[in-house]
Image (tube, rainbow, N blue to C red):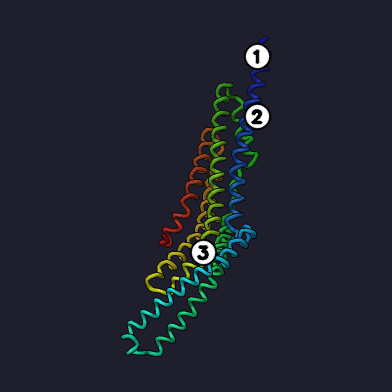
Amino acid sequence: MFGIFDKIEEFFKELLLGGIQANLESMFLDINDKVGAVATDVGKTPMGWNGEVFAFIKSINDSVIIPIAGLIITAVLCIEIINMVMQKNNMHDTDTFEFFKYIIKMWIAVWLVSHAFEFSMAVFDVAQHMVNKAAGVINTSATVSGDQIVAMMDTLKEKGLGELVMILFETSIIKVAIQAISIVIMLVVYGRMFEIYVYSSVSAIPFATMGNKEWGQIGTNYIKGLFALGLQGLFLMVCLGIYAVLVKTIEITDIHTSTMTILGYAVLLGLMMLKSGTLAKSVLNAH
């Protein structure tokens, strides 16, 4: 009779242990796969990330934005020549060199507007180079091996049914939390790429304002924003590298401590990736 109860207890223990192990494997798999995917996506240029979206944004720039930028640059150049005439006492103090400088300035302004999109893409080519260099330094994998999970499970075999139920409940909650964090990480990376596409699509307009002293701050702030988006990619890689090193330093001994520590590191990773854009803008004083 007592042997039957032992068999029933053993059956439920194996069932609970199997659920706990499945939770642990799924928990680590979700966050580690997402970290690997992010490291790959961050290193891609706008053209490499999605060629069709890139072609769409470029067509918007060529057919919609550049004509508007042409109107803006015409207004800016008209304001410039009016100011120049007024400063020279209504042409009474004529200086031929001033007109020569105006022609050079006009040529540079038109050239910048017509190549604004290429300049924007060049910024992210430089950013990709930085990210790839960082990826070469960050060579620590955040993956927790199967042997570590097996070692963690060995410590649970002597525990009672009640404690195993609590551990299963705890690991299930942590697994859901880490899955939510992995979604946040994905949204940060994809959101950055969306921002790059939207930001680059109107590049000709702020570049058109750079020929005027008063309006030139628009173009200057835009360029700072471009470089901030590029620098954000490097910050994302640094966050991933820190997370990978921290996970590797966890000693898999007590399941409660280990899982809660990994959850804490995952939460920190998500928060820092959310703040990466703000940090990049603050470094370059972009607003």
Q: Residue at x 61, y 61 (%)?
A: 56
- Real-space CA distance between mark 2 and mark 1, rounded to the nearest whole angstrom: 20 Å
> In the picture shown, does residue 10 fall above or below 193?
above
Q: Is residue 75 left or right of residue 188?
A: left
Residue 24 visible here = yes
> In the picture shown, does residue 230 fall above or below 21?
below
x and y percent of residue 132 in the render?
59, 60
- Secondary structure of residue under mark 2: helix
Asked if the residue under mark 1 is in contact with the one under mark 2, i.e. CB atoms within 8 Å, the reply is no
Q: In the rendered structure, which amino acid carries the disc numbered 2?
A: Gly
- Secondary structure of residue under mark 3: loop
Q: Earlier in the sequence, mark 1 or mark 3?
A: 1
Quadrant of the rendered structure where residue 124 is?
bottom right
Q: In the rendered structure, which amino acid carries the disc numbered 1?
A: Phe
Frontmost residue, 31 versus 242: 31
Q: In the rendered structure, which amino acid carries the disc numbered 3?
A: Val
Residue corresponding to mark 1: 5
Residue corresponding to mark 2: 18
